[in-house]
Amino acid sequence: MGREHHCDAHLTARGWRQTAALHKYLTAHNSIISPQVVYVSPLTRTLETAAGVFGMPVHEGVDGHVDQGATLFMNHQTVVPGLRCQAGPIATTMHVVALELCRERVGMWDDEALGDDDDL
């Protein structure tokens, strides 16, 4: 894989499993941990992490019905082999704020570029 596969990368299947496990834990401890706002980097993998951890699946059978009080956070994703896993649409009842200040600046890919909004 070339370096282009690391620019604004999506979560892997393992990453989605980890978000599901954390979502289950937080749901079980909702009386202790109940954030109203989540701040994340604008990179795709952090937005997908927030969607997986703090979101809820949208019931697709009823015209993409979103539960009352929730807003659509992430559209359905199709598989792109080697780049993106399939994920259903996700809604959330909390505010998720993407801030450039939250973006990592150190690491293997210091100059990591943001992808197009159409890719999300």
Image (cartoon, grey):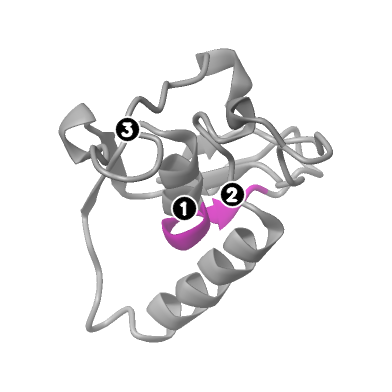
Going from N to C along the chain, the mark reached first, 2 or 3, is 2
Q: Is residue 114 magenta?
A: no
Q: Is residue 64 left or right of residue 47?
A: right
The residue at the far left in this view is 101
Can you give x and y, in whole percent of width and height, for residue 62 in the image? 76, 40
Going from N to C along the chain, the mark reached first, 1 or 2, is 2
Can you give x and y, in whole percent of width and height, for residue 3 in the image? 59, 30
Q: Which mark is residue 110?
A: 3
C-alpha separation, residue under disc 1 versus residue under disc 2:
7 Å
Q: What stretch is highlighted in magenta?
A: 52-58
- Give the structural element (helix, strand or loop) at label 2: loop
Can you give x and y, in whole percent of width and height, for residue 29 in the image? 34, 85
**Residue found 61% across the figure and 21% down from its top:** 119
Q: Which mark is residue 49?
A: 1
C-alpha separation, residue under disc 1 versus residue under disc 3:
20 Å
Does the CB distance between marks 1 and 3 fall below 8 Å?
Answer: no
Mark 2 vs mark 3, foreground winner is 3
Does the CB distance between marks 1 and 2 fall below 8 Å?
Answer: yes
Q: Can residue 68 be seen in this view?
A: no
Q: For mark 1, does the 10 Å Cα neighbourhood hold few (<14), some (14 to 19), or many (20 or more) residues?
A: many
Q: Residue 11 carries which label?
A: 2
- Give the structural element (helix, strand or loop) at label 1: helix
| Amino acid bearing label 1 | Thr
| Amino acid bearing label 3 | Asp
